Image: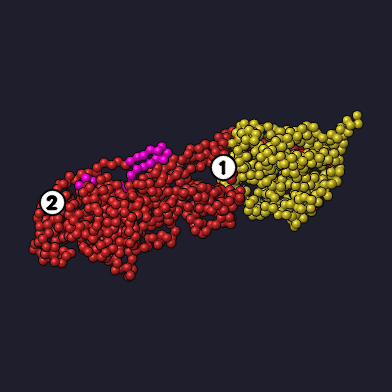
Chain colours: A red, B yellow
Amino acid sequence: MKYPIELKNDKQDIYYFQLRLALCFGFVFLLFFILLIRLLYLQGIQKNHYQTLAEGNRISIVPMTPNRGLILDRKGLVLAHNYPAYTLEITPNKVSNLSATIDELSKLVDIRPADRKNFARLMADSFRAESLSIRNHLTDTEVARFSAQRYRFPGVEVKARLFREYPHHEKFSHLIGYIGRINKSELEQLEEDELANDYRGSGYIGKTGIEKNYENDLHGKAGIKRVEVDAGGREVRVLSNTPPTSGNNLILTIDAQLQEVAEQSFGNFRGALVAIDPTNGEILAFVSKPGYDPNLFIDGIDEQNWRGLNDSPDVPLNNRALRGQYSPGSTIKPFMALAGLHYNKRSPSYSIKDPGHFSLSGSAHRYRDWKKDGHGTVDLFKSIVVSCDTYYYGLANELGIDNIFNFFSRFGFGKKTGIDMEGEVSGLMPSQEWKQKRHNQQWYAGDTISVGIGQGYDLVTPLQLAYATAILANDGVAYRPHLLKEVQSVRVNERRLPKMDIEFNLNLNQDHLKLVKSAMVGVTQPGGTAARAGAGAPYTFAGKTGTAQVIGMKQGEHYIESKVQERYRDHAWFIAFAPADQPKIAMAVLVENGGHGSSVAAPIARKVLDHFLLNKAPQSAPAMHEAKGGAND
Amino acid sequence: MIRQRLWQRFIAHLDPTLLASLGILLLISLVVLYSASDGNWYRVLTHMINILVACTALWIAANTPLHYLMRVAVPIYLLGLALLIAVAFFGEIANGARRWLNVGVTTIQPAELMRIAVPLMMAWYFEKCQATLTLKNYCFAAVLLLLPVTLIARQPDLGTAIMVAASGLYVLFLAGISWRIMLAIFVTFIASLPLVWSTLHDYQRHRIMMLIDPSQDALGRGYHTIQSTIAIGSGGIFGKGYLNGTQTHLDFLPERTTDFIFAVYSEEFGLIGNLVLLSLYLFVISRSFIITTHASTYFTRLMAGSITLTFCTYIFVNIGMVSGILPVVGVPLPLISYGGTSMVILLLCFGILMGIHSNKRIVQT
């Protein structure tokens, strides 16, 4: 079908054209009206909102990390410090393709798979849009190489950061502890304590030891710098600046040299030593062997090192001085003697005939003395000097557990000392009530007899025993053991001392004390159990040996055949204070599997005392090669 | 005396009103460009040269007799088509698109040529068949339009394709296509959207998705829109002051001398500045509409109408995308954005418009 050919009417044509044109013109007006509304909305109504956004774009708030306070020993030796180094840092939310950026960066800077792993972990842990380190400790060449190409990497920066370092590595590990990356739960805690602002940009927090306990002093407060940045995140100019407040320096009561002497004296032995100034509670040495290198933990320990430390049968991560619980053995005999005098169960002159064993009336069971044939006639003085078990079997039986519990509790047994370090354990001072609760059994007279020579239910930590020794040395006047001597505020140059009141006074009979102390001096003199260790000392010192039996394997240890023999050996104890008439130092030494007490533990104590009192350099020969035999426990 | 007559002949075909308003807008573009390029005089100078070349094109177009314009319509259209096909085979690839053709001395974008060739061709065709317009003619005209549009969209260059399509559709509309057919086209268009979507490149889809929710990819594709919206909004009523735009000068605005130059202007001159700019544009548009209504032939009416409406579309699409109500399609802001080819084509169009106006009596039918 054909369309009819229609000639166009020109006038009508123009009319239709102009009609449509007018429609178009109207439409254009409508479009312009829409634009106008949009612009009115953006620039009029929403003006403040967008101005805030533009300011947010332009202004970046850069937290400035405060310098962490130093940790020094009592003589000013640095135990923990900071050193500056360059890091390469990425702000993840300013980088569109992270893995590609890291690939590109690795062409300029050595980035190992471990660094990437670390970064991935930081990313997972990071809680703010903060810059995260991809590589620490850049070399100068690497810094230069990156700086030349910096324009290619928006959101990537080289920063000079301060790093924590423990220059003595394992030597003070259990004392100082270490810092590490803030984790989620620590952050929540900080937010709860309203401290999160002080930690902006920090990323590190004390995890154990002094670093943890005095975190608030050490950390300081973050500063804030408001800077104008361009789209690449680069600083254009500084708008305002609130400098950070540095953390305070801590001066510890520790004598680093003394500690070093103590550590060396242990040689290859495991164990712990706590030395306290009995006149004020200052802890002079705080050793737990073996230690570990705290530097490994700062940026997260790698798996290999972690397994090495965690799986080691030596349990280097265990703070033995604070958390190790051992039977006290004969070291409690001086305290037992005091209790006997206190409760009028023994007079100084009362003596027994020691047949080498003790039996409860009506029982055939023999409690044996360590010396098969006994010690002959033994009075209180001799009972300590020769460490007569039989004497204390009888005494314990007569005192009864209630009296022993009451008296020993006053010396801090079975209780935390309150030292300024987290994680302390309380040891165990058994009582009738305790046994009923714990074992659902009544207390037997035999239980008391074992407690009497420190081989019963009772457990002590080296710290506790050192504390009790210090109380004894200071004639019953107790000071809480502490590690902090002084807080130095760097900024205002002000010092703060911890409160140092007498914690309590046991009000013991001075004559009793004098007797027991003189007996302890006897221990280190010819005829005493530690005569060998005391030989030739130009000062008088008091001591007491002890042996803790090791029963079976401890929890968490693995059966390693070649080590079994050694690990079944007894733990050796020695407590001491000196000079005997005016004690300046009191200590407890524990040597794990050291065998018989006096041969290993006492010489260590002697070396520490020599250094402390005579400033004598330690002998290089480790304690384990010291004379064998001599007086036994 | 002779000089005066020469001058009069020189300006005889120019429209002073239109020329003055165009001049003011071009002056604004120089001022804004100086700020947008962070005081880069080289950029500004290049822009000045572009403007000079474009003004020459305007003068030539204004002085070209209309019958001559009609005579070159077909060759230009065929040349453009040939170049587009050449691009498809030998074009240079940049940013994932094949748009440029290297002709030795310089590279050209044949798609830009189509912005003038398509309406010219279609107006010429309708003029030829004026007396006996049937559905068949509209269909053929539609083919004339779809051919280049498809080629351009395939490069891919969505922005130019849309603009060329728009200029052709305006011709169809003004040529008097019936409402019923237009409705049919519209329905077909809506129905074919899913199909179009499937042929789009990923980055084009991204841009459309970004419009719906720019924040979902704040550092990627949505970045452009978010930053330009912030720039405009933060300008407020009075603006941050010339050379004081933080979004501009701290590098937050992308492509700020070309497609996003409106955000620079808005940030520094505020709502007041925008009102001035829109008023100037409206003035140019109104003048162009007047010229269109006075156009004497079918050809010139269609041509002038298409030029005017395309100009409006450019403004709306550009400001719309920069202010975040339209997807980012890569369309410059006419007379303000930096860019040689588009400037020349634009002023060429205005030259044709002026020519149409000055010739309205001479070719009266």
The three-letter amino acid code for the residue at tag 1 is: Glu
The residue closer to the viewer here, B74 or B223, is B223
On screen, residue B179 versus residue B12, left or right, reads left
Label 2 Cα neighbours within 10 Å, binned few <14 / some 14-19 / many ≥20: many
Q: CA distance from mark 1 to mark 2?
A: 77 Å
Which label lies toward us, 1 or 2?
2
User: Is B60 included in the stretch rendered in magenta?
Assistant: no
User: Is A495 included in the stretch rendered in magenta?
Assistant: yes
The residue closer to the viewer here, B328 or A267, is A267
Numbered range of the magenta stretch:
A475-497
- Helix, strand or loop for disc 2: helix
Picture coordinates of residue A325, whole percent (x, y): 27, 57
- Tags 1 and 2 both on a single chain: yes
- Outermost residue, bottom side: A561
Name the residue rendered at 67%, 52% in the picture: B95
| CB-based contact (under 8 Å), mark 1 and mark 2 | no
Name the residue rendered at 30%, 49% in the picture: A283
Name the residue rendered at 22%, 47% in the picture: A582
Q: Total marks drawn?
A: 2
Q: Which chain does the numbered disc 1 sit on?
A: A
Q: Say if residue A23 shows up in the picture.
A: no
Q: Answer with mark 1 or mark 2, whichever residue precedes in sequence.
A: 1
On screen, residue A131 versus residue B338, left or right, reads left
Instruction: Please tell me the numbered disc located at residue A235.
Output: 1
On the image, numbered disc 2 is attached to which residue? A341
Name the residue rendered at 10%, 52% in the picture: A347
Q: Which chain does the numbered disc 2 sit on?
A: A
The three-letter amino acid code for the residue at tag 2 is: Leu
Q: Relative to A63, does residue A177 appear above or below in the rendering?
A: below
